[in-house]
Image (cartoon, coloured by chain):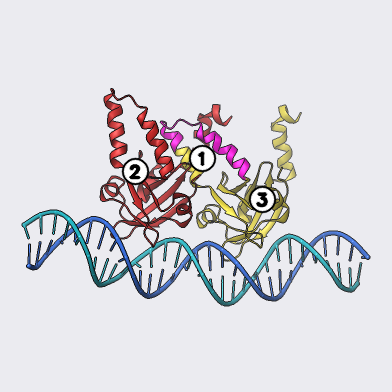
Chain colours: A red, B yellow, C blue, D cyan
Amino acid sequence: MFTGEYHHSIDTKGRLIVPAKLRESLGDKFFIVKGVDKCLNLYTNEEWEKFVAKLRKLPEGNANARKLVRFYLSSAFEVEVDKQGRILIPTTHRDYAKIDKEVVLSGEDNKVGVWSVENWEAISIDDEEATDISNAFADIFG
Amino acid sequence: MFTGEYHHSIDTKGRLIVPAKLRESLGDKFFIVKGVDKCLNLYTNEEWEKFVAKLRKLPEGNANARKLVRFYLSSAFEVEVDKQGRILIPTTHRDYAKIDKEVVLSGEDNKVGVWSVENWEAISIDDEEATDISNAFADIFG
DNA sequence: CAATGAGTGTTTACAGGTGAATATCATCAC
DNA sequence: GTGATGATATTCACCTGTAAACACTCATTG
């Protein structure tokens, strides 16, 4: 399970040092994919396979379903960490997530989110808001 | 069940000696998570898994649900006690709970609270207040 | 062919994390 | 009370992970 929040920076060539702790779970080779909420996601090979399995279940006859499959599959890149523990984030992905210097990585159970600080702060909530939202899902949190 | 109040200090590197009695229940590896009221919480693996199980039930398509999952998961760190019975409290967590030197640990049934002395004193009540609040919940305390 | 830009590899420096040693304190048995 | 034991506190030294800088290769373009 991925957890935790990591603040890092990328170098001028768009390379990101993957936090040592995450690397333990991610391995040397994994997938970087565009995600919702203007972030990128890192998937282990295994988790990526699971995700793709879901995509395969989508109805081919549905135009929106085809768009979704294309969005995810075309954005998936397999990356490899170099000797210094860095990965290169493809230019298209950097543009998509508005990443230029300061980056936040967030553990999200089965994947890792990669954000620009700006987008991260825009989307993250404080403990009060968390309480409110929890209450809205009272059926789950009791 | 966790109970009791423990006063401890952290060293200059942000490490906290986990009280021996709590360590018996917490084990060698457990989770440290941000909580409400500007405190931190320690969860056993078991209790944490229970909580995450709830989070997994939330609908992925809902933006608020995603925010909530990120809030909790990104604040969770798995920590391991070293040979001397200490854990390292991540910098982000120390900042969040305003912890710098003096720390209070409080047993809270299924989890352990970690507070700066200042926050602890600000939030703790005396017997009069306890009586008043108990009276307000007369339906429960009779 | 020169110039540019993207990607790759190497090096260095520093801060923060980690481990070990020691000191202080409390508790308990005798 | 005294000594033994274990828990807590403090300090120091070392090492790893991260940041930043720079040189090099390769492909593309004018």
**Residue type at numbered disc 3:** Gly
Badge 1: how crowded within 10 Å, few (<14), some, or many (20+)?
few
Q: Position of residue B85 (x, y in %)?
A: 66, 59
Of residues A51 and A122, the one nearer the viewer is A51
Residue of label 1 = A128
Residue B109 x, y percent position in the rendering: 69, 41
Amino acid on which the number 2 mark rests in the picture: Val
Residue B1 visible? The answer is yes
Magenta stretch, residue numbers: B45-66
Residue B17: x and y, percent? 65, 59
Residue A83 picture quarter: bottom left
* Label of residue A33 in the image: 2
Give the structural element (helix, strand or loop) at label 1: helix
Q: Secondary structure at mark 2?
A: strand
Using the image, name the chain to which the residue with label 1 belongs.
Answer: A
Give above or below for B72 relative to B7: above
Q: Residue at x 70, y 54 (%)?
A: B6
Using the rendered image of the protein, determine whether residue B39 is visible from the camera's viewpoint. no
Name the image quarter holding the C terminus of chain B: top right
Looking at the rendered structure, whether the residues under marks 2 and 3 are on a common chain is answered as no
Identify the residue at horizontal 60%, vertical 47% (top origin).
B41
Q: Is residue D12 left or right of residue D23?
A: right
Q: Which class describes the residues within 10 Å of circle 2: few (<14), some (14-19), or many (20+)?
A: many
Give B71 or B20, whichever is nearer the viewer.
B20
**Which residue in the structure is indicated by mark 3?**
B27
Magenta run includes residue A78: no
